[in-house]
Image (cartoon, rainbow, N blue to C red):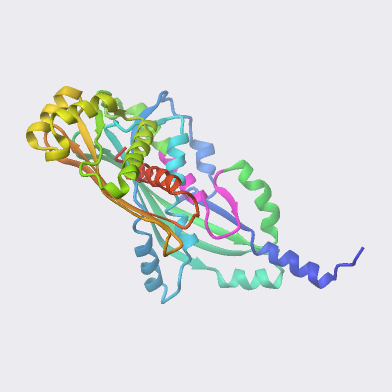
Amino acid sequence: MIPIPKRFLLLLIVTNAFSCHLHHANIQGDAYGAKGMIFGKEPFFQGTLPVRVEFDTSDKAFVRDYLKRKGQNIVVSHDRIDSYFSEEIVAKFRNSKYFTHNPSATMKIRVVSSLEEVKIAVVSLIAAVGTLGIIPAVSRTHGSIQFELFDSSQNKSIRTFKYSIHHREFLGTSTIILGSFLPLFSERFDRSTNERTFAVMRVAFKQFENDLMIELDQDKTLLKRFTADLNKIYALLPFRNKTNSINSYEDQLHSELESQFLKSGIALVERKKQDILLEEIKFSNSGLTDSNRLAFGKLTNANRVIMIEDLVIKEPKTSNYTEILFSIRCVDIESGQIVWSKPSKYVSFESNSLDWHIGMSAREMIYQLQTSGEL
């Protein structure tokens, strides 16, 4: 056996230690979760609530620039910012026993997050280096997560829950041991190989879920607002002016979107029936007008129409990526008002078939609509 130099072994241990991040997050005023264990109670509310979740992550670039200016030109990593804009929050809603995602739900939960301060403890960093990580280096972040209950049937904000978040990050040899078992006992702890953590969103969601369930148990009026319009029917219209060069791709994108919309839970008009009626109202010639829109809605029982337009496909002939562009919008049949509208810009460097990319672009669009609370 070839002997391993002690210096090399020591260097290997220290290097691995400083790539093991142990995270701890908590709500302000409840540093170790003791308040919940001592004074908390299991909510008496039983059942599930139909909701849509809106989570906008577009402020990440602003937050990074704001922290850079606030910290006298200190750059905060994307991973650290992502902890407060993690889509883990969407996953928590979907996995909760109290919430059920319903595209027809009248209650939309708007989640707004912010990272407000980052502190690096220089003294702890010196101690960590001097003790080879036995005393861990500690950094802290402070921010907030807000949950707004928005009743879309009345276009009115009902209630807001806001939580101040304290997050600590430990780095050192001791975190290898602590990080192996602490996350098993509490979602407040998380272990990762970088500065990104799910603990921030998990703690915020758990507190919101608990507070909302207790409030619903006490306020039956609020509970009655969580309803869903089960009679809402959508019609996914085909491309009106098909381009001969990409005709088959337009049909494929339409089929992929149809499949994804059905998976999301919305009710669609049967395509065969829809195509016959569209031919009758000369949709390919005149499009959807005020008069034929109402007639189409009456014949199909549809409340809303979804239209796909402006498909552009850039294949990787002169570049190493595939780009698929299109726009999609939903119109209320009775009023003619635009309910929602989204541009799609799908870019991928994966070397797969164009059929695969079209399918992925459809999935990405549905995901955007879901995380923006439209579905």
Front residue of 89/265: it is 265
Q: Quadrant of residue 50?
A: top left
Front residue of 349/158: it is 349
- Residue 288 pos. (x, y %): 14, 37
Instruction: Please give the range of residues in magenta.
Output: 187-208
- The answer to whether one can see residue 156 in this image is yes
| Residue at (46, 41) in percent of width and height | 91
Q: Quadrant of residue 104?
A: top left
| Residue at (40, 42) in percent of width and height | 363
Front residue of 212/103: it is 103
- The answer to whether one can see residue 110 in this image is no
Q: Is residue 202 magenta?
A: yes
- Residue 195 pos. (x, y %): 54, 60
Q: Is residue 160 magenta?
A: no
Would residue 253 be found to the left or right of residue 19 on screen? left
- Residue 182 pos. (x, y %): 64, 47
Q: Point out the residue furthest to the bottom here.
A: 72
| Residue at (59, 54) in percent of width and height | 192
Which quarter of the figure is the C terminus placed in?
top left
Q: What is the tally of numbered marks visible in this picture?
A: 0
Compared to 117, does 150 lie above or below? Answer: above
Q: Point out the residue furthest to the right here.
A: 1
Compared to 106, does 79 lie above or below? Answer: below
Compared to 217, does 93 lie above or below? Answer: below
- Residue 42 pos. (x, y %): 48, 29
Q: Point out the residue furthest to the front here.
A: 244
Would residue 221 be found to the left or right of residue 177 on screen? left
